[in-house]
Image: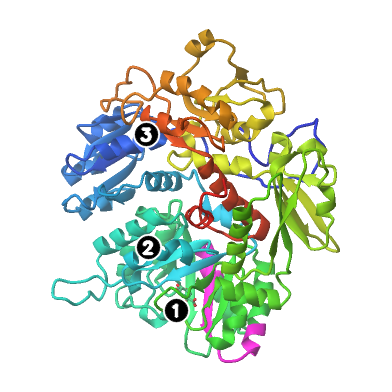
């Protein structure tokens, strides 16, 4: 398994090590999944997403004694007490189909580690993949966000999240997380009124709907009446009940107010699993003082259980912004962890909303109401930062062999939507011409390069990321400000686009130790794919059309004959990096290794199907071709992705790296049309 930050290759020049990435363990998780009577298909889907076998279990005892890597499924209409017999050897997940007419038995939920709510009328497999990847610790959204210089959250204020869905992709441009204000949800009652507090059932379904439509981490907030919310404060146990459920539902963040009794905050912290806690404090009295000694104590109290400490207070003078900035710098010098999110609310405090760097709440003109006085949109914050000299105008380049108008339009759309001062410029590149003079241009703010530069030929880049070095290609040039100048870093984002595509419908551990088959005309065309596969801990990689000799060649073997194909281990994934005119060459292989049965690996009774199944096919070719390998692959049972998926994920990553902004995959697909690819 390669790590983006740990590839050492002696034959390429030395450079700064950047982009360290934690890699999940390849262990196959042991799970027992409860399902509604007759809905065991969900268990087969979970198993498929995990790349594991599954089997029905007649009793908890049977699941306990079965092979750990087999996923067991059991009806949740069982006597609840049976569940008490389960030890911690398996993670217990209750699944509940919301549109199936089943009653949710909360006594069952209470005994489970996690709960997954879903609909069958519209089913989102990527949501299963995200849920499992998160609760199993195979993705780390918080870890990723702590590497960003600035993070924001969009705080939605909808009484019913369905109203947000049509505009969600636009609303969330520039947001790193999305907050669901549970206290603002209004559950309609049969008498035509709305409930004071939405029921857990309603909240769970709202959360499910939101999560089905966004890839952003979710912040689950039950704001109390004293802090500008609607959750009544008389019964702290109510907060515990709702927040503990959010952990079970796999929310990435829960907002835990500091006034809650220590006992409750401790219990939530002890049981938080992979969720992170935002310790929250709001003061609307107008009497709060950043300079008071108690303010530091309050931070320290929040830091005990908080992964982020948030302190927001209503102010009425400019002076209080200066006091907050002084507090911010002293507290973070003393305690670099946990990160501090500090804001002044009200119009006078708006300056602090531009200065804060951790999860600054943003609003959007399309939201029904702002969540707090003085809230600004991402565009307003960026414009203010530019005015204050914090975000300088830069030229971001697309360097390529053909001018793609839609690419330029797309970048400009993002810059406009976010009020970023940058311009997008296209620079034509002839095959042998050097591009280095572009890097020296005034205002050069970074570039993507397509086709990529060879890493060994990028002499003007003082450092290369480990990914760029190992892959041997630079497709992104980043500018990092230093004391008196700026330094350039050559990076590779393509492999991240490939990795993100591979993990959309399968968790990372599904790839661990499995075989892959890779077709390409040259090693250079295949190296980003090899890096992505190795980063996922794939087993042997078989190649057709080239022999790997570079730094990534360990465990990469060429297939030389039809006999070899017959002998090969069944590939879990096939990637074709062949050009469009050759892309049909993969079709016989897709047929040969076709997927047996809808969900592959198991027949649903724990037995291996006649042959283990191939799962994922990625075709990296772009341009016209005689027939579509994706359609043929899908017909043969593969989960198939094309260049449009990989390019959109690569663009998400490119924008994140070049301008530090988060733009979701769905927005890229929506706003770029077909032209990007
Ligand atoms: O805590 C906060 C911050 C906030 O109150 C604001 O001031 O922007 C908005 C709320 O939605 C969020 O929960």
The residue at the far top in this view is 563
Q: Residues within 10 Å of mark 2 (few under 14, many from 20)?
A: some
Residue 48: mark in rendering: 3
Determine the residue positioned at 24% across, 49% down.
Answer: 97
Instruction: Check the image and report above or below for 639 versus 123.
Output: above
Q: CA distance from mark 2 to mark 1?
A: 18 Å
Q: Mark 3 and mark 1 in contact (Cβ < 8 Å)?
A: no
Residue 370: mark in rendering: 1
Q: Position of residue 289 (x, y in %)?
A: 58, 86
Name the image quarter holding the N terminus: top right
Q: Which residue is mark 2?
A: 165
Determine the residue positioned at 25% across, 25% down.
Answer: 605
Q: Residues within 10 Å of mark 3 (few under 14, many from 20)?
A: many
Highlighted range, magenta:
300-322
Nearer to the camera, 66 or 619:
619
- Horizontal arrangement in the rendering, residue 207 relative to residue 363 (left or right): left
Q: CA distance from mark 1 to mark 3?
A: 42 Å
Q: Earlier in the sequence, mark 1 or mark 3?
A: 3
């Amino acid at each position: 398994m390669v790590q983006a930050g740990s590839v050492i290759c002696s034959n390429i020049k030395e450079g700064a090590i950047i982009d360290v990435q934690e890699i999940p363990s390849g262990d196959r998780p042991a799970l027992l999944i409860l399902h509604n009577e007759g809905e065991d298909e969900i268990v087969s889907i979970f198993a498929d997403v995990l790349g594991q076998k599954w089997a029905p279990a007649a009793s908890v005892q049977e699941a306990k004694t079965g092979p750990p890597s087999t996923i067991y499924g059991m009806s949740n209409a069982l006597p609840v007490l049976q569940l008490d017999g389960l030890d911690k050897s398996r993670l217990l997940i209750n699944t509940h189909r919301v549109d199936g007419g089943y009653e949710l038995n909360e006594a069952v939920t209470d005994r489970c580690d996690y709960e997954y709510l879903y609909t069958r009328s519209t089913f989102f497999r990527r949501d299963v993949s995200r849920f499992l990847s998160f609760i199993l610790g195979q993705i780390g959204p918080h870890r990723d966000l702590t590497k960003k210089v600035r993070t924001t959250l969009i705080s939605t204020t909808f009484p019913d999240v369905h109203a947000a869905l049509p505009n969600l992709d636009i609303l969330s441009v520039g947001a790193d997380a999305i907050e669901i204000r549970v206290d603002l949800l209004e559950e309609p009652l049969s008498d035509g009124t709305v409930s004071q507090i939405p029921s857990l059932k309603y909240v769970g379904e709202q959360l499910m709907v939101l999560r089905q439509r966004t890839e952003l981490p979710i912040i689950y907030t039950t704001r109390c009446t004293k802090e500008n919310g609607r959750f009544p404060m008389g019964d702290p146990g109510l907060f515990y009940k709702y927040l503990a459920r959010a952990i079970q539902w796999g929310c990435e963040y829960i907002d835990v107010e500091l006034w809650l009794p220590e006992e409750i905050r401790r219990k939530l912290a002890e049981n938080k699993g992979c969720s992170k806690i935002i310790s929250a404090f709001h003061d609307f009295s107008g009497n709060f003082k950043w300079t008071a000694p108690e303010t530091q104590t309050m931070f320290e109290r929040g830091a005990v259980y908080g992964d982020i400490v948030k302190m927001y207070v209503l102010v009425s003078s400019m002076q209080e912004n200066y006091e907050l900035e002084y507090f911010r710098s002293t507290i973070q010098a003393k305690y670099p962890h946990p990160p501090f999110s500090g804001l002044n609310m009200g119009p006078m405090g708006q300056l602090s909303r531009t200065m804060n760097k951790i999860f600054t709440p943003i609003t959007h003109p399309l939201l029904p109401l702002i969540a707090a006085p003085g809230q600004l949109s991402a565009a307003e914050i960026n414009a203010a930062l530019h005015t204050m000299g914090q975000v300088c105008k830069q030229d971001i380049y697309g360097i390529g062999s053909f001018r793609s108008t839609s690419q330029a339009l797309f970048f400009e759309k993002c810059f406009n939507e976010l009020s970023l001062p940058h311009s997008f410029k296209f620079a034509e590149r002839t095959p042998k011409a050097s591009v280095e003079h572009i890097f020296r241009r005034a205002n050069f703010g970074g570039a993507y390069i397509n086709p990529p530069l060879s890493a060994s030929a990028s002499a003007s880049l003082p450092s290369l990321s480990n990914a760029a070095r190992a892959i041997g290609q630079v497709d992104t040039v980043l500018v990092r400000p230093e004391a008196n100048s700026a330094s350039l870093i050559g990076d590779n984002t393509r492999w991240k686009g490939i990795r993100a595509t591979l993990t959309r419908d399968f968790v990372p551990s599904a790839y661990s130790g499995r075989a892959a088959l890779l077709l390409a005309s040259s090693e250079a065309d295949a190296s980003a794919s090899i890096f992505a596969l190795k980063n996922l801990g794939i087993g042997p990689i078989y190649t057709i059309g080239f022999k790997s000799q570079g730094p990534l060649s360990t465990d990469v073997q060429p297939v030389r004959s039809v006999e070899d194909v017959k002998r090969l281990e069944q590939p879990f994934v096939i990637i074709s990096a062949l050009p469009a005119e050759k892309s049909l060459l993969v079709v016989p292989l897709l047929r040969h290794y076709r997927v047996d049965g809808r969900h592959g690996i198991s027949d649903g009774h724990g037995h291996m199907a006649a042959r283990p199944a191939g799962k994922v096919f990625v075709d990296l070719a772009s341009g016209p071709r005689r027939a579509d390998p994706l359609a043929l692959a899908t017909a043969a049972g593969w989960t198939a992705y094309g260049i449009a998926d990989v390019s959109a994920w690569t663009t998400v990553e490119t924008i994140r790296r070049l301008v530090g902004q988060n733009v979701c995959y769905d927005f890229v697909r929506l706003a770029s049309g077909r032209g990007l690819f």
